[in-house]
Image (tube, rainbow, N blue to C red):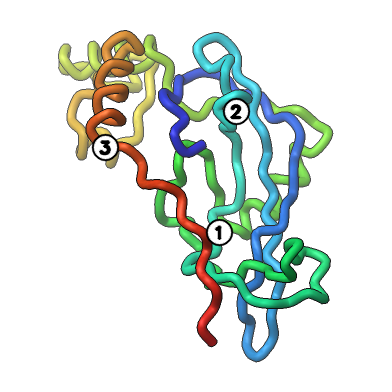
Amino acid sequence: AMDSELTAGGAYMTAETKTSFKGYYRVGAQNAVFMRSFIQFDGEGEAANARQRVIGGHPAAILKGLCMRKNPQSSYANRDGFVPYGKLVNYAGGRSNGCTSWSPADAEQIIPLVKNSPTTLYIYPESRDIAAVARAKAGGQALSAAGVYWNASCLKEIGTPKFWPKKTLEPIIAQYKKDHPAPPPQPVPICQD
């Protein structure tokens, strides 16, 4: 979901699960295959463009420091006989690029639960929920008394939440992209070991 523009709040429905090869990594003296599943989300309302933005959920694991290694026997080798190798990193305590990510252990339980059983997820707060929390805070009202919820540690860190409408954010994002163009893509280097 990198470059996913704006992630809107609301209901997301789990759709198909795709599992793909990401590369190899070391486990002791052996090489292991890293396959990662991705649950595509379909959205409703403001979130209706979730599919085109490739918003979904996956295990919080990635291969870092990728390089290409000659391995023509691998069924995953490219036409030149190379496959990606990297270091497996679990970033369950970190942030994903617009997607929902779960610890690999939690993902092992979640993915089978939603496979062939579409499930509605409420991931990001909708604009009306953000406004309700802001009103309750401004009025000194307990969130529970106002019938709203916001994670207490997050609220302590950010103060009063503010909803930024699309018409406000889109020009800011467009200007940022103009001021900070992405570097040209670079090929993955050949492994030096």
- Above or below: residue 22 compared with residue 182: below
The residue that appears at 23% across and 11% down in the rendered structure is 135
Tell me: 136 left or right of 31: left
- Image quarter of residue 171: top left
For the residue marked with disc 1, what is the amino acid?
Answer: Ala
Q: Residues within 10 Å of mark 1 (few under 14, many from 20)?
A: some
Q: Position of residue 57 (x, y in %)?
A: 60, 40
Circle number at residue 61: 1
Task: Tell which circle, 3 or 1, labels the residue nearer the N-terminal end.
Answer: 1
Residue with the mark numbered 2: 121
The residue nearer to you, when weighing 143 against 108, is: 108
Camera-nearest residue between 77 and 110: 77
**Viewport quadrant of the C terminus:** bottom right
| Label 3 close to label 1 by CB (< 8 Å) | no
Residue indicated by mark 3: 180
Q: CA distance from mark 2 to mark 3?
A: 33 Å
Q: Is residue 96 left or right of residue 76?
A: left
Q: Residue at x 38, y 9 (%)?
A: 128
Q: Amino acid at mark 3?
A: His
| Residue 79: % across, % down | 76, 62
Q: Please state which amino acid type lies under the numbered disc 2.
A: Leu
